[in-house]
Image (cartoon, coloured by chain):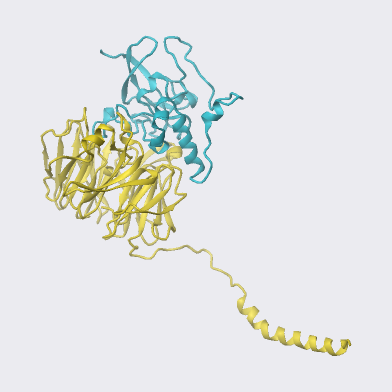
Chain colours: A yellow, B cyan
């Protein structure tokens, strides 16, 4: 039998009780108004899993960028914007990024302005601008265009227009304190304290010593040792625990010990065997070397070497003990390398900026592919691990 | 300009890239579309039955100067590195309207297949407008490191111009090379 009166009353009472019960809950779950403005900040010190990927912005050169990513979580943490032919240096002790850039007051025209923009780690915010002479070297990405001195007191910036010199910037006062003329020489490779060396067009090396104020204190040229015409040393070298490892176009390694202010040439050795060289295995990659403080060296290699292949993407990376001059591994990459770098962990990651415009992360010792980070610009050419030196 | 554009190459396609720009453009297309997209193959389209090329074909009009100046394999481009001005409103030896030709440059020596003679070619950049972005070509055959600047193609040669912003590259004949 139907009992409408009875049921209707029950239902009405039940609904009333239910509403009374859930009403406070509903009010509690209501979304609250949110603050505006609202901008993220980053925790410092950064975890050592951060890295910065440099998009050269080939197709819109005046608007390049740097993306800060976490290579373990694949998270994008933020970015820095930059003008054309930018450089990046970073100091974990100062928790600052130094972006070298060339801009024009009216976009593509107007007054040329060259500067170092200083950004802090916590906000990725501009904290200072250091003016440079409007002669920064404007080249496709080259790590040796700007470097911190070993003691992190000075930032050194290569100038070229087309005469060459090095600007010395005091990072405490954030002022340019010296310009060291270096006719015929180029690029910057730090040695001990505030000293550095450059490579020169006559096949020599020029050592520059700075005093505590950043002023020129000494210079010395080596004898010629680079065969630029027949088998030049690539300028895309990497440091393994105080030794700069230069690799020639054909694959001969020239170590330069930089643990004292006057660099010392080490004995040369070959990356590949005679048979491999005969089969055209050669070093490759835009920046095809990576170094670890322990003395390990990774080099991008191609089996398709020819006269002019030295900047081709590298389908393999070979791992060497640069002290023992022995090969420890030979890794086939998921995607060919434009540039490589390595973290300074005891169990390092190999970071590969690929021809597919991704950042690929590998176990640097085993060569095991781990993960990729995508959408870091159309033309990413370089990666800087936060532990980079 | 003289660029690295090796990001736009794949070693597996070196042979194709060196003999034509097919490998190069295919990779650029892959790059522009992102890693997960299906690559565009412009040359495949160019050679399709419909016949429309990626850029209109050009000729110097001089049988002694053979080839198509919009193609990477045009003889003068043996050491070029950058966007071809022929695809950007200029020609193989002139800059696009409104740009400024750099007086400083790097040079190559290329062999003209018509007369079999080698010519010194000056790769003057055109400056003052942003990247043209068309017909990117790269050859590193004679390239030497930055510390030998006259033979280096990583350097932005928009020097001595009112703006150092790079637009595209020309290939101007300077004269016969000394044999």
Q: Quadrant of residue A386?
A: bottom left
Q: How many marks?
A: 0
With B23 as the anchor, is A244 left or right in this view? left
Residue A283 x/y as whole percent: 28, 38
Q: Quadrant of residue A43?
A: bottom left
Residue extending farthest bottom: A6
Which residue is more in the foreground, A188 or B35? B35
Which residue is more in the foreground, B59 or A150? B59
With A234 as the anchor, is B88 left or right in this view? right
Residue A318 x/y as whole percent: 28, 45
With B40 as the anchor, is A57 left or right in this view? left
Which residue is more in the foreground, A272 or A238? A272
Against A205, is A329 above or below?
Answer: below
Residue drawn at (19%, 55%) of the image:
A151
Residue extending farthest front: A275
Residue drawn at (52%, 29%) of the image:
B43
Residue extending farthest right: A1
Which residue is more in the foreground, B75 or A197? B75
Q: Is residue A88 visible?
A: no
Residue A218 x/y as whole percent: 11, 43
Against A385, is A281 above or below?
Answer: above
Q: Is residue A302 visible?
A: yes
Residue A292 x/y as whole percent: 24, 53
Q: Quadrant of the N terminus of chain A?
A: bottom right
């Amino acid at each position: 039998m139907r009992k409408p009166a009875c049921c209707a009353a029950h239902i009405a009472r039940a609904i009333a009780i239910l509403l009374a019960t859930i009403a406070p809950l509903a009010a509690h779950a209501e979304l609250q108004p949110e603050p505006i403005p609202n901008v993220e900040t980053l925790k410092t010190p950064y975890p050592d899993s951060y890295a910065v990927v440099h998009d050269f912005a080939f197709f819109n050169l005046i608007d390049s960028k740097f993306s800060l990513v976490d290579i373990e979580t694949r998270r994008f943490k933020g970015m820095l914007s930059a003008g054309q032919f930018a450089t990046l240096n970073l100091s974990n002790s100062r928790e600052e990024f130094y972006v070298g850039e060339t801009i024009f007051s009216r976009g593509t025209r107007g007054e040329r302005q060259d500067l170092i923009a200083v950004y802090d780690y916590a906000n990725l915010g501009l904290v200072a601008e250091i003016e440079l002479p409007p002669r920064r070297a404007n080249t496709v990405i080259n790590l040796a265009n700007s470097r911190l001195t070993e003691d992190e007191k000075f930032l050194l910036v290569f100038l070229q227009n087309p005469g060459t010199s090095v600007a010395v910037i005091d990072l405490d006062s954030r002022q340019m304190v010296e310009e060291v003329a270096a006719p015929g020489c180029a690029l910057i490779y730090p040695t001990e304290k505030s000293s550095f060396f450059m490579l020169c067009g006559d096949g020599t090396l020029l050592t520059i010593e700075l005093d505590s104020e950043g002023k020129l204190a000494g210079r010395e040229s080596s004898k010629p040792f680079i065969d630029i015409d027949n088998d030049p040393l690539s300028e895309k070298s990497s440091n393994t625990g105080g030794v700069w490892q230069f690799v020639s176009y054909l694959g001969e390694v020239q170590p330069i010990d930089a643990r004292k202010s006057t660099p010392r040439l080490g004995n040369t050795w070959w990356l590949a065997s005679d048979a491999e060289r005969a089969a055209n295995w050669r070093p490759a990659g835009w920046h095809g070397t990576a170094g670890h403080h322990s003395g390990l060296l990774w080099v991008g290699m191609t089996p398709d070497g020819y006269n002019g292949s030295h900047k081709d993407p590298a389908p393999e990376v070979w791992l060497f003990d640069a002290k023992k001059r022995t090969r420890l591994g030979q890794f086939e990459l998921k995607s060919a390398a434009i540039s490589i770098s390595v973290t300074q962990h005891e169990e390092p990651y190999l970071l590969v900026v690929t021809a597919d415009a991704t950042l690929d992360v590998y176990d640097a010792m085993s060569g095991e592919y781990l993960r990729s980070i995508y959408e870091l610009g159309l033309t990413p050419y370089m990666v800087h691990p936060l532990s980079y030196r | 300009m003289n660029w690295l554009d090796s990001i736009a190459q794949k070693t597996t396609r070196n042979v194709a890239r060196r003999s034509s720009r097919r490998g190069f453009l295919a990779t650029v297309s892959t790059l522009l579309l992102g890693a997960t997209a299906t690559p565009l193959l412009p040359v495949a389209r160019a050679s399709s039955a419909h016949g429309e090329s990626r850029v209109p074909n050009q000729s110097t009009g001089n049988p002694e100067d053979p080839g198509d100046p919009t193609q990477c394999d045009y003889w003068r481009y043996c050491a070029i590195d950058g966007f071809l001005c022929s695809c950007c409103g200029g020609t193989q030896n002139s800059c696009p309207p409104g740009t400024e030709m750099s007086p400083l440059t790097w040079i190559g020596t290329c062999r003209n297949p018509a007369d079999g003679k080698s010519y010194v070619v000056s790769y003057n950049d055109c400056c003052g407008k942003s990247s043209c972005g068309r017909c990117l070509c790269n050859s590193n055959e004679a390239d030497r490191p930055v510390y030998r600047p006259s033979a280096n193609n990583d350097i932005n040669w928009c020097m001595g111009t009112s703006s150092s912003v790079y637009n595209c590259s020309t290939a101007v004949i300077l004269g016969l090379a000394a044999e």
